[in-house]
Amino acid sequence: MTQIDNRTEGQLKPEQTQVPRLRFAPSPTGFLHIGAFRTALFSWLFARHSGGKFILRIEDTDLARTVEGAVEDFTSGLEWLGMDVDEGPIIGGPYGPYYQVQRKALYQQYASQLIESGHAYRCYCTPERLDEMRKEQIANKLPPRYDRRCRYLTPEERAAHEAAGETWTVRFAMPLEGETVVHDMLHGDMVFKNSDLDDTVILKTNGLAPYHLAHLVDDHLMGITHVLRGEEWISSAPRHVQIYQALGWEPPLFYHVPNVLGKDKKKLSKRRNAPSWSDYKREGYLPEAVFNFLALLGWAYDDQTELFTREELIKAFTLEKIGISSGIYDPEKLLWMNGVYIRKLSLQELVERTLPYMERPEAEGGLPDSIQRPLDRDYTTRVLTLEHERLKTLGEASYVVSFFYEKEIDYSLDILIQKKMDAAGTRDALIEARDLLHSLDSWEHTLLEAQLRELVARLGLKAGQLFGTIRTAVSGRTATPPLFEMMEVLGREVCMQRIDQAIAKLEHNS
């Protein structure tokens, strides 16, 4: 394949005489990782930007590899990300059915048409023969491909195969000479030698069509105007162009979009633990943050803008700004972006969206099962007020706030005793703090801070020493929200009880 970079303004901005129609056509042979939803998002964004239609079609002709629940996963993922569908299996539409297994007769019709026009032929080769042929080619260091044996059968030989009742597939007869040009809107014209391409199967023995024919027939009959798919399909594109020509159809506009790579520059894949949308949901990522993040994997508005609302992305998105360099999946950037989106939530929204994560079972990442559900909303609002600026995911809330709800907290002495302090000095400081706190008429955080700072000076300690000890005593943690606001929310009774327990722990271990 050679590539000619001769993109023109006309190619980049084609004149549209019809409403753009784009599709997401997953195969239910597995659960899609987030990179596949990225490509679907590009199609959805352009459909919404241009006033077009976004179609969901299920390419389920690979019956042997179909995974139960995969279709529900696709539709739930689209719904979670907020990508509404104009036509599809659930909503219906004028070009249905939207499951390929229900379109079997269409594929047979067009395969027969290709046979009649001399552009395809029946192949009677058994799987055993094909396997032996490939092994021999590999042994001879030849590229494994079909040797076109059945392409050259005489009418008498074909009749004999039919009379014997042998099963057959249909193969497309690629031109043996010349070149095929694939017009790609991102890569320019890509030129392929026809002699490098074999005769691919376009109808299987069970009468269903594989991808090479099925998607093409469906795209044509459903009026698809723009096809966005991963760049791994570039090598198959010349076959598709030839089939379009053989059927006398105009191809849609092709956009072979860059793959999504991990930080190691290898293609993101399920085999390499690529996350799915449901992983993000379970961990407490906001769908609007994931939506924003995915849009930037291979597309950019400019060199600096990274945060977009859904409406801003729809308005800004154009296909011309899709790059040809692979997008890099950076989980740290997503985590940062999610934190930004969490901080943009109102306190009421934060509580509403975090409570389900906190109230789910402990085994699923929720608060300890010993904590009674449902949680007190007013108290939880006060708790989350302290954590709003610190949360990066909703899922982590259960851990970072658990000490606000637990009746008993556990921690080791080494985090209770601060630097340049010993157990006896720590115990004495806590006794002084307990007595001071016990005498206060108010438990308001500004008063707590003023009185405890005076105690620091009186004891001759550093603020970090006394405050660090009190922080661990009342929370069991070394990192918490601001100490005095935290103590106010925990309340006098809980704080005093936990300080007493810390003193007892120090005495027990002295």
Image (cartoon, rainbow, N blue to C red):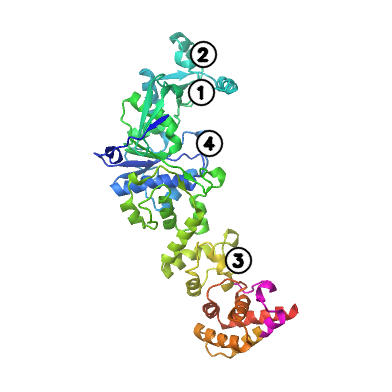
Marking on residue 145: 1
Q: Are the residues tagged 4 and 1 within 8 Å (C-beta)?
A: no
- What range of the chain is rendered magenta? 406-428
In the depicted structure, whether residue 81 falls above or below residue 351: above
Nearer the viewer's eye, disc 1 or disc 2? 1
**Mark 2 or mark 1, which is nearer the start of the sequence?**
1
Identify residue type, mark 1.
Arg
Q: Is residue 500 left or right of residue 199?
A: right
Identify residue type, mark 2.
Ala
Marking on residue 65: 4
Mark 3 secondary-structure assignment:
loop
**Mark 2 or mark 4, which is nearer the start of the sequence?**
4
In the depicted structure, whether residue 129 falls above or below residue 379: above
Q: Which residue position is annotated with label 3? A: 368
> x, y percentage for residue 156?
45, 8
Marking on residue 21: none
**Mark 1 or mark 4, which is nearer the start of the sequence?**
4
Q: Quadrant of residue 134?
A: top right
Nearer the viewer's eye, disc 3 or disc 1? 1
In the depicted structure, whether residue 166 falls above or below residue 31: above
